[in-house]
Image: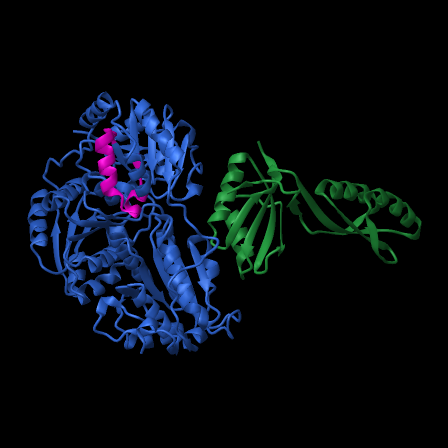
């Protein structure tokens, strides 16, 4: 069955490593919902979090193919166990002095915050899992979203969970 | 000079040893690395960005073969690698030199051939400026190399070369490219060659899991209709002897894939021949009826499964042995997955497996072979049939030759009618299907084995894609038997247009090409031609008795098709047997 999966890969912090990973996805016909890269706990290594969708067989194949890359050190199937996943979004929404207070009310239960106020707009910052961000975007849609920028998902396993590895 | 800091190249012990810590240029380092890796030949072509390397070559003991095109160089390096199991090395300049390697890299990548490809690039100060002869070759070759490197500092060069050879030749072999900008080749540093490779992220698993070996031994005991599908992995692992011993001890028939043809004796009673699209009736029947399919280093390619993976070997438990874990479950799920070097797997299972209860099954397969062997109608007028041409070559050598082919009909006829038994004796582009591969590959094979008979078989189409390398054959007086089976057209394309495009023959006519015999004579190579069976036998004898290069043109009719055939999209039970006698 097609499902969303979150995969964590630990890679050498080498020029071109993101290209290698992204290219592999394209070459093998795997889709990328999001991909994020940043420092890891170890100097010289980066961690990438990839959200993709596919059936179990496809995911197994993706993980094996990642592992074949010489610059890939570890591949983990994060979503096969308990994990925390977070995304950050910046949303520029149309706002007049009249609607500002109303928008503040809408975002409050999401623990989102206003990070910029312009004459005719607000920039709202929200973090959470992707569903939460989707929900807030939907609620803000009627006011007019002028720009939207999402970071993509970063994620980590909970506790000392053992994860499916390749 | 203290001995503990000096590494001696034992190949030519009379020459001065290479001293560690000696200050030298990047290009000198490169050549020293190649010598320390035991490289015998490099194939290549000079140009602006590799001038420093070629200047270093001028005073090096490394043997360089100057081809007439970079594509010829890389296919020759590939042929050398396939004929020896050692890595092939090729050098090309930046830009067009590097991009001319691309087809050869992809060819080697698809067939898991170890190559180390060295390209020059413009100086780093010019990288990214669209400088003269600049190409992003690491970017271009990313999907077709096992790994590639762009060298930023001269100090890193020896480590990178060491890693490149390690990666190319271990695990599932493949091509590795090293792109060296001109400033790195010119820069100097003290030379230290690392003795070992430390790659945290690369540890191929070569030892099989014992539990799975037990399961395999048990499955063999229970099977009534077992078969082995023996792929290119057998050849890559050098496991021919072990496979033969295993097959004979367990009485399990061996179906070699196209890439595995030289992995098991083609004349053996347990061998019904190649399976798949143009495979034998017996092998395809065996795959349809087997209850235990043991895949050893094959990848369930679509020319065998016909892309119908769900209907493939429908009654069989599948055992899949591969050194590359990603191959297992890629196309077909495995009941028993075994990751490891197939030679290790065979040795492990040899210690446990017993003779299978397969006598009736072996007899059944042999009956299928008798019922529908590969066959063709001889020409009533005595004209030469291409299949007969291959038979003549086989009969005269008894299979004791290295045969390279190009791609198309002649390739299938060689696969069907030439029976291989020597290790690494069949060299052909199986995965990528590269026309123009076979002839330059024969150059590499003959360089590697100067005393063996090397036969290069091409069609008139593919031969014209790299015939410029005739100059190399003449220059080095390589005793290759260069065969062109000339049907004056692109035969395989013609066959598909006849069968699937209603005889609409579009752009396949090559009848206005060249007088091949005169052409090779212009290179100073002896040229022979035959168009009847009787002529063919005489001409081939003459070719076999010729010392030095010889060219043979077998002129055949355009209309001959390759049979048997399973049309793309059909399953293996839907074979067209063609015009049997």
The residue lying at 29 percent from left, 22 percent from top is B224
**Which one is nearer the viewer's eye here, B348 or B459?**
B348
Say if residue B573 shows up in the picture. Answer: no
Q: Which chain is blue?
A: B
- Give residue B290's quadrant in the image: top left
> Is residue A74 highlighted in magenta?
no
Residue B133 in the figure: left or right of residue B234? right
- Give residue B408's quadrant in the image: top left
Residue A119 in the figure: left or right of residue A148? right
Please name the predominant secondary structure of the magenta segment in the image.
helix
Q: Is residue B494 above or below residue B218?
A: below
What sort of colour scheme is used for the picture?
by chain
Residue A100 x, y percent position in the rendering: 90, 50
**Furthest residue toward right:** A98
Residue B473 x, y percent position in the rendering: 19, 62
**What span is colored magenta in the figure?**
B229-253
Residue B568 x, y percent position in the rendering: 37, 34
Q: Is residue A76 above or below residue B453?
A: above
Quarter occupied by the N terminus of chain B: bottom left
Q: Which chain is green?
A: A
The residue lying at 26 percent from left, 28 percent from top is B354
How many labels were placed on the picture? 0
Residue A102 x, y percent position in the rendering: 90, 45
**Which one is nearer the viewer's eye here, B548 or B566?**
B548
The residue lying at 79 percent from left, 43 percent from top is A136
> Is residue B243 highlighted in magenta?
yes
Say if residue A131 shows up in the picture. Answer: yes
Quarter occupied by the C terminus of chain B: top left
Residue A125 in the figure: left or right of residue A19? right
Q: Is residue B568 above or below residue B1?
A: above
- Give residue B55's quadrant in the image: bottom left
């Amino acid at each position: 069955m097609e499902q969303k999966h979150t995969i964590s890969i630990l890679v050498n912090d080498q020029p071109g490593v993101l290209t290698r990973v992204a290219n592999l996805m394209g070459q093998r016909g795997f889709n990328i919902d999001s991909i994020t890269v940043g420092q890891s706990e170890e100097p010289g290594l980066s961690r990438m979090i990839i959200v993709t969708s596919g059936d179990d067989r496809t995911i197994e194949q993706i993980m094996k193919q990642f592992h074949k890359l010489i610059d890939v050190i570890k591949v983990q199937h994060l979503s096969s166990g308990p994990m925390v996943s977070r995304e950050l979004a910046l949303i520029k929404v149309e706002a007049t002095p009249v609607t500002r207070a109303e928008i503040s009310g809408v975002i409050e239960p999401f623990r989102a915050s206003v990070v910029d106020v312009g004459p005719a707009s607000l920039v709202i910052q929200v973090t959470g899992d992707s569903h939460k961000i989707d929900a807030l975007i939907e609620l803000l849609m009627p006011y007019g979203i002028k720009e939207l920028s999402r970071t993509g998902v970063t994620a980590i396993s909970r506790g000392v969970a053992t994860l499916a590895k390749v | 000079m203290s001995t503990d800091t000096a590494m001696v190249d034992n190949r030519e012990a009379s020459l001065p040893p290479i001293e560690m810590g000696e200050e030298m240029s990047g290009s000198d380092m490169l050549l020293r690395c190649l010598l320390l890796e035991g490289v015998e030949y490099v194939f290549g072509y000079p140009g602006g960005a590799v001038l420093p390397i070629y200047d270093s070559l001028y005073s090096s003991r490394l043997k360089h073969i100057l081809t007439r095109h970079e594509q010829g160089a890389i296919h020759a390096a590939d042929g050398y690698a396939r004929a020896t199991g050692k890595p092939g090395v090729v050098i090309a300049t930046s830009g067009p030199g590097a991009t001319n390697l691309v087809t050869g890299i992809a060819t080697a990548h698809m067939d898991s051939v170890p190559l180390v490809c060295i390209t020059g690039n413009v100086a780093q100060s010019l990288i990214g400026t669209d400088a003269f002869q600049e190409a992003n070759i690491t970017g271009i070759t990313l999907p077709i190399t096992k790994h590639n490197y762009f060298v930023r500092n001269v100090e890193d060069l020896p480590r990178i070369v060491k890693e490149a050879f390690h990666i190319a030749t271990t695990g599932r072999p493949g091509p590795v490219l090293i792109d060296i900008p001109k400033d790195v080749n010119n820069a100097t540093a003290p030379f230290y060659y690392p003795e070992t490779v430390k790659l945290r992220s690369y540890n191929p698993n070569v030892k099989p899991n014992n539990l799975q070996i037990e399961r395999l031994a048990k499955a063999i005991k229970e099977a009534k209709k077992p078969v082995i599908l023996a792929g290119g992995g057998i050849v890559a692992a050098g496991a021919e002897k072990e496979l033969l011993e295993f097959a004979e001890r367990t009485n399990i028939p061996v179906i070699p894939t196209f890439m595995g043809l030289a992995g098991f004796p083609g004349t053996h009673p347990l061998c019904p021949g190649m399976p798949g699209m143009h495979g034998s009736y017996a092998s395809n029947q065996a795959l349809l009826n087997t209850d235990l399919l043991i895949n050893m280093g094959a990848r369930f390619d679509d020319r065998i499964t016909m892309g119908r993976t769900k209907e493939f070997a429908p009654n069989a438990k599948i055992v899949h042995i591969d050194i590359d874990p990603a191959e297992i479950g890629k196309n077909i799920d495995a009941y028993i997955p075994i990751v490891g070097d197939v030679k290790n797997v065979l040795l492990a299972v040899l210690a446990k497996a017993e003779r299978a209860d397969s006598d009736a099954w072996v007899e059944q397969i042999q009956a299928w072979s008798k019922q529908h062997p590969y066959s063709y109608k001889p020409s009533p007028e005595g004209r030469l049939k291409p299949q007969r041409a291959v038979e003549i070559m086989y009969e005269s050598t008894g299979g004791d030759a290295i045969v390279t082919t190009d791609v198309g009909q002649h390739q299938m006829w060689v696969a069907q009618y030439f029976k291989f038994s020597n290790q690494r004796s069949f060299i052909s582009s199986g995965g990528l299907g590269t026309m123009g591969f076979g002839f330059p590959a024969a150059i590499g094979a003959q360089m590697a084995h100067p005393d063996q008979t090397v036969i290069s078989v091409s069609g008139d189409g593919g031969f014209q894609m790299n015939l410029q390398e005739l100059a190399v054959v003449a220059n080095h007086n390589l005793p290759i038997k260069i065969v062109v089976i000339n049907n004056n057209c692109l035969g395989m394309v013609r066959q598909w247009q006849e069968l699937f495009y209603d005889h609409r023959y579009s752009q396949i006519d090559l009848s206005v090409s060249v007088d091949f015999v005169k052409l090779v004579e212009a290179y100073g190579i002896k040229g022979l031609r035959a168009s009847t069976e009787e002529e063919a036998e005489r001409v081939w004898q003459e070719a076999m008795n010729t010392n030095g290069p010889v060219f043979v043109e077998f002129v055949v009719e355009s209309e001959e098709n390759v049979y048997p055939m399973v049309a793309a999209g059909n399953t293996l039970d839907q074979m067209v047997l063609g015009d049997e006698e």
